[in-house]
């Protein structure tokens, strides 16, 4: 699916929802597809769209808030995923249109194009107060760490 | 809404646990869209980190927010941050009426 088609799919059924779009192509195309008084187009402050949506959804539980973000922008404000997960705002929904590049500036790749399961991260963040544990003793963890740093490898510790 | 990132001997408590000063400013801007005014608190270093959102969002859209910037008690240890934040703070204060800063 192309980005424009995705934006059309998201915006078409909307009635009174508030929409916040990330700066660049997504704001421009949302304006082109369905400009409406309850659209807020970010023109700058890349990466802040989800936090902006959190502030609106948190203070106005009577409103439905939809955030449309690109993968580059979502990565810039990625910690806001954890805040929204923590707050469990039922009236906030965020779409990340992942084309694996910064489309507005010419299609340079984002690190979303690296193998990475974002859903795993969000799943962990949803487990409030229940962080994943390593099933090892402190001694085993120490040994594993020493072993890992002695490898002089740039690969992550498995 | 009272929101921000705590600093040493912070007298404020954030209503929600924000992850960065920039995020706190954006959340406050969202609250303003919903009809609520906010005070955002942060330390001088965080102020520098949040500038893009302060200028690109709050200032650009004429969103009213109050910002409290706590300057560190030992500026001699953070001289560059301290001076830069003070200078920028004065500049932004002079440029716009929608962002009020206290420190």
Image (cartoon, coloured by chain):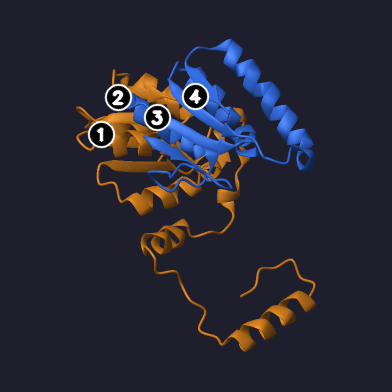
A139 vs A130, left or right, is right
Circles 4 and 2 on the same subunit: yes
Task: Name the residue: 51% across, 42% down.
Answer: A77
Judge whether B19 appears above or below B102 on screen.
below
Could you tell me how far apart the alpha carbons at marks 3 and 4 are, in whole angstroms?
Answer: 15 Å
- 2 or 3: mark nearer the eye: 3
Q: Chain of mark 3?
A: B
Q: Work out whether residue B45 or residue A98 is closer to the camera in this orientation and state it.
A: B45
Per the image, the residue denoted by label 3 is B38
Q: Earlier in the sequence, mark 3 or mark 4?
A: 3
Q: Describe the element under mark 3 as helix, strand or loop.
A: loop
Do the numbered discs 3 and 1 sit on residues whose CB atoms are within 8 Å? no
Q: Colour of chain A?
A: orange
Task: Name the residue: 42% across, 60% down.
Answer: A125
Circles 3 and 4 on the same subunit: yes
Judge whether B14 appears above or below B100 on screen.
below
A136 vs A58, left or right, is right
Could you tell me how far apart the alpha carbons at marks 4 and 1 are, in whole angstroms?
Answer: 20 Å
Q: Residues within 10 Å of mark 4 (few under 14, many from 20)?
A: many
Per the image, the residue denoted by label 2 is B35
Per the image, the residue denoted by label 1 is A60
- 3 or 1: mark nearer the eye: 3
């Amino acid at each position: 699916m192309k980005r424009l088609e995705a934006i059309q799919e998201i915006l078409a059924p909307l009635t009174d929802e508030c929409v916040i779009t990330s700066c660049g192509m997504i704001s421009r195309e949302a304006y082109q597809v369905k400009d409406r008084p309850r659209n807020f187009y970010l023109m700058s402050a890349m990466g802040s769209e989800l936090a902006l949506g959190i502030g609106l959804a948190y203070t106005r539980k009577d409103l439905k808030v939809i955030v449309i973000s690109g993968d580059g922008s979502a990565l810039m404000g990625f910690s806001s995923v954890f805040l929204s997960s923590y707050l469990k705002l039922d009236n906030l929904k965020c779409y990340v249109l992942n084309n694996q590049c910064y489309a507005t500036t010419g299609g340079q790749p984002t690190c979303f194009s690296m193998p990475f399961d974002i859903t795993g991260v969000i799943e962990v963040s949803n487990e409030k107060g229940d962080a994943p544990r390593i099933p090892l003793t402190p001694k085993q963890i120490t040994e594993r760490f020493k072993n890992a740093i002695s490898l002089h490898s740039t690969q992550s510790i498995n | 809404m009272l929101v921000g990132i705590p600093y040493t001997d912070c007298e404020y408590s954030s209503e929600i646990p924000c992850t960065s000063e920039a995020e706190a400013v954006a959340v406050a801007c969202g609250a303003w869209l919903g009809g609520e005014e906010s005070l955002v608190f942060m330390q001088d270093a965080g102020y520098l980190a949040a500038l893009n959102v302060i200028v690109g969002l709050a200032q650009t859209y004429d969103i009213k927010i109050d910002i409290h910037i706590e300057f560190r008690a030992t500026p001699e240890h953070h001289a560059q941050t301290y001076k830069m934040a003070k200078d920028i703070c004065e500049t932004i204060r002079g440029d716009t009426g929608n962002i009020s800063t206290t420190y």
